[in-house]
């Protein structure tokens, strides 16, 4: 790919330029004459459309799409992909639209060009939002046709090659975007040659000083390595010859960005990274790979735990190779990669190396299968993401290169991001399995759901039909699919809970006006929705439930009641306090219980509205309530429903004698009484006594009273009191 400038002519100034004649001559090596003619026709349309336009380098604009097409020709892409590459900027930068392209060529080429084009007709608040929206559009278009991302990668590669003419700040921004998004995408699709060049060019542009220092250090170190490299290479070749094994041996240069990343991520010194000698052995057949492995292990001792078999278990992007690390001469580490010629082509070009399989409808290619799985995952992320920024965040998480390989109980291999937990595995199996996950076994042993998985583990997920995702899972999941599905569920749940609570609050206020929601004039309701820029009644109820709209004011607007009418009705038998809102305990995220006093069923309670959060419930007399009663529009009378459900947190202080094992004794007694301890801390008052502070769950005041009675019966307990703010 880096040789894309092989067929060049030069202008008088000496700058290289790409000519259509050079491209057509190169295409004769693998395309039919009529297909080359179509490519030339696309060039004529592109050249006419871009007539008079120049790049910042000063050369005619059409040289850029030609250069992009040449990069794709090196990958031996089909002629329609090359045509789309030559036309890829006409929708964005000229008067030609998608419909005109479809007429001039066909719908397929129009879709390819449109997929690569940026969203120019929408105004975004920030550049970050615009970038996220454009990446989202491109990736979703890619799920229909993978060639869209290949054109975009080639486009980005040529832009990076000519980045030097940009202003430094713009150059750094484009370089960072390349390193964070485009290079990882190339890696995810297995296109190593493009990924490597994008990383190197991004490194030069974003950290020019670091690049310069590292380049000088590598050049200096390389002078001392030639003799050692030669000796190791000769020893390997001689051993292969003795064993009757063919193959070629290549010394593998570490790329500067790869060295920089290793130093930064693993906190290594320069000498620790550079003093590793790397070789690649390329052979003819698969079984020869394993024979060569045995030969090099007999030549130099292998480093324990550093062997990886990516042939038996390929990487997600289809990469296959044997990796091993040896103790070389004088204890020097020697990295060896062993692969076949076909695996080598696959490692360099990824999905592009197997383009002909897609054209023929054969999906057996490992790269195609890996890409297909990733594209399905992208569509799931799109459904769960709220906006383009969130979608891009999920995609970045999904592009982590490190992987862990685990097995299902039936022996199927699952590839997950490094650090993945049981929950990540459950969502990788199926969204429903993740949503209903309650427990898991790893290698037949029960483990917590937050357990991180390791290579070779067999994971079995236990589900329950009534189970739902827990917000706490977001603290430890690492895969984008798990994170997106959990967030999506919680977001929908909050919408539902807020709408239900809003409905109850609005009905309560309408009752004061001798009305109910069914009696509201539909025209008046629609006018109010239009004014608030809301689409449905549910959205209005959700706004009320979240505290963004006051139910009293909404009720007035819906009934056209004057403030005096409401005041009069408030003095009647239907006063606000006479019909308080019933708290059931199932309102979830839109009804919160204040941490200052931690109310539980049976306590006298009051509440306030908190915009964006909903109802916050306090105990009567809580010091933090202050003057809220005087502020009628944020004050709400509430009471417990007849049968509240769920567990509620409360805080108790237990003064104990300073004896060994007292904390365990008290905790065991709390657990015996059916309570879960959420947090415990200790205050030492003097050498004889300590105060234990427990935050634990109870069902109601009666349950708490039973627990306190049980704790008072313990000999070590001197005093117990509930903290109520």
Image: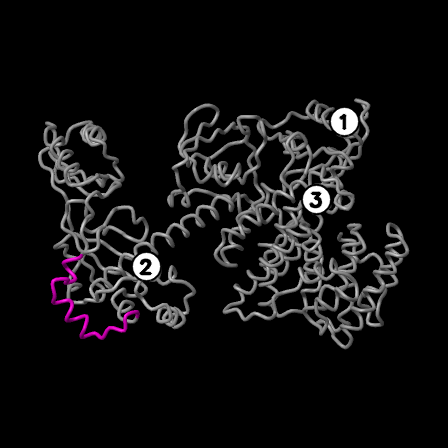
User: Residue 338: percent from the left, percent from the top?
Assistant: 72, 33
Q: Nearer the viewer, residue 308 or 685?
A: 308
CB within 8 Å, label 1 to label 3: no
In the image, the segment drawn in magenta is: 558-579
User: Residue 695: percent from the left, percent from the top?
Assistant: 22, 41
Q: Residues within 10 Å of mark 1 (few under 14, many from 20)?
A: some
The furthest residue to the bottom: 52
Q: In the rendered view, how is the structure colored?
A: one colour
Q: Which mark is residue 253?
A: 3
Q: Residues within 10 Å of mark 3 (few under 14, many from 20)?
A: few
Q: Would residue 564 be counted in the magenta stretch?
A: yes
* Up/down of 174 relative to 664, above or below: below
Q: Nearer the viewer, residue 316 or 157?
A: 316
Q: Secondary structure at mark 1?
A: helix
Q: Nearer the viewer, residue 42 or 214?
A: 42
Whether residue 629 sits left or right of residue 38 in the image: it is left
Report the residue marked by disc 1.
288
* Up/down of 114 relative to 459, above or below: below
Report the residue marked by disc 2.
546
Any part of residue 216 in sight: no
CB within 8 Å, label 3 to label 2: no
First along the sequence among labels 1 and 2: 1
Q: Nearer the viewer, mark 1 or mark 3?
A: 1
User: Residue 468: percent from the left, percent from the top?
Assistant: 39, 41
Q: CA distance from mark 3 to mark 2?
A: 58 Å
Q: CA distance from mark 1 to mark 3?
A: 24 Å
Q: Would residue 435 be counted in the magenta stretch?
A: no
């Amino acid at each position: 790919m880096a040789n894309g400038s092989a067929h060049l002519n030069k202008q008088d100034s000496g700058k290289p330029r790409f000519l259509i004649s050079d491209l057509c001559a190169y295409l004769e090596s693998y395309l039919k004459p009529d297909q080359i003619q179509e490519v030339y026709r696309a060039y004529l349309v592109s050249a006419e459309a871009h007539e008079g336009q120049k790049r910042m380098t000063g050369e005619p604009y059409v040289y850029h799409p030609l250069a992009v097409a040449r990069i794709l020709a090196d990958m031996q892409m089909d002629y329609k992909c090359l045509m789309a590459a030559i036309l890829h900027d006409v929708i964005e930068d000229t008067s030609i639209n998608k419909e005109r392209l479809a007429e001039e060529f066909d719908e397929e080429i129009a879709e390819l060009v449109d997929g690569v084009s940026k969203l120019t007709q929408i105004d975004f608040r920030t550049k970050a939002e615009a970038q996220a929206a454009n990446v989202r559009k491109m990736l979703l278009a890619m799920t229909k046709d993978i060639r869209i991302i290949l054109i975009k990668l080639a486009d980005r590669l040529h832009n990076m090659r000519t980045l030097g003419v940009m202003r430094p700040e713009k150059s750094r921004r484009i370089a960072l975007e390349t390193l964070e998004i485009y290079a990882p995408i190339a890696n995810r699709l297995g296109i190593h040659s493009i990924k490597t060049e994008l990383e190197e060019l991004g490194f030069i542009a974003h950290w020019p000083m670091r690049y310069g220092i590292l380049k000088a250090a590598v050049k200096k170190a390389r002078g001392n390595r030639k003799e050692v490299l030669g000796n190791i290479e000769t020893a390997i070749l001689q051993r292969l010859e003795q064993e009757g094994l063919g193959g070629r041996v290549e010394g593998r240069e570490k790329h500067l960005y790869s060295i920089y990343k290793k130093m930064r991520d693993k906190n290594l010194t320069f000498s620790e990274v550079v003093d590793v000698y790397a070789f690649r052995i390329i052979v003819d057949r698969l079984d020869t790979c394993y024979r060569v492995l045995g030969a090099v292990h007999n030549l130099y001792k292998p480093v324990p735990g550093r062997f990886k078999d990516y042939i038996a278990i390929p990487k997600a992007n289809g990469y296959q190779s044997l990796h091993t690390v040896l103790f070389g001469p004088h204890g020097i580490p020697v990295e060896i990669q062993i692969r076949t010629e076909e695996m080598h082509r696959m490692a360099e070009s990824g999905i592009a190396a197997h383009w002909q399989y897609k054209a023929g409808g054969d999906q057996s290619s490992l790269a195609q299968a890996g890409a297909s799985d990733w594209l399905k995952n992208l569509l799931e992320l799109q459904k769960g993401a709220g906006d383009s920024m969130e979608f891009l965040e999920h995609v970045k998480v999904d592009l982590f290169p490190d992987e862990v390989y685990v097995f299902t109980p039936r022996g199927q291999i699952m590839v997950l991001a490094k650090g993945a937990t049981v929950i990540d595995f459950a969502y990788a199996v199926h969204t429903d399995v993740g949503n209903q996950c309650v427990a898991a076994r790893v290698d037949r042993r029960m483990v917590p759901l937050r357990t991180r998985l390791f290579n070779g583990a067999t994971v079995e997920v236990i589900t329950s039909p009534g189970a739902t995702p827990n917000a706490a899972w977001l603290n430890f999941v690492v895969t984008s699919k798990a994170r997106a599905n959990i967030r999506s569920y919680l977001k929908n749940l909050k919408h539902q809970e807020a709408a239900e609570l809003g409905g109850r609050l609005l009905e309560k206020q309408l009752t004061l006006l001798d009305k109910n929601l069914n009696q509201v004039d539909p025209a008046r309701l629609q006018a109010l929705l239009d004014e608030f820029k809301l689409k449905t009644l549910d959205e209005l109820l959700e706004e009320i439930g979240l505290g963004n709209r006051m139910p009293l004011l909404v009720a007035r607007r819906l009934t056209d009641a004057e403030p005096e009418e409401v005041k009069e009705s408030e003095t009647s038998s239907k006063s606000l306090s006479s019909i308080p809102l019933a708290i059931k305990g199932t309102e979830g995220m839109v009804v919160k219980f204040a941490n200052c006093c931690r109310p539980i069923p049976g306590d006298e309670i009051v509440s306030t509205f908190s915009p964006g959060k909903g109802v916050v419930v306090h105990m009567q007399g809580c010091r933090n309530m202050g003057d809220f009663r005087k502020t009628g529009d944020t004050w709400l009378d509430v009471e417990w429903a007849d049968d509240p459900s769920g567990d509620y947190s409360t805080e108790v202080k237990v003064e104990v004698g300073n004896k060994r094992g007292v904390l365990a004794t008290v905790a065991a007694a709390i657990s015996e009484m059916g309570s879960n301890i959420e947090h415990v801390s200790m205050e030492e008052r003097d050498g004889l006594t300590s105060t234990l502070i427990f935050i634990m769950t109870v069902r109601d005041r009666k349950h708490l009273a039973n627990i306190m009675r049980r704790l008072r019966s313990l000999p070590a307990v001197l005093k117990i009191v509930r903290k109520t703010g």
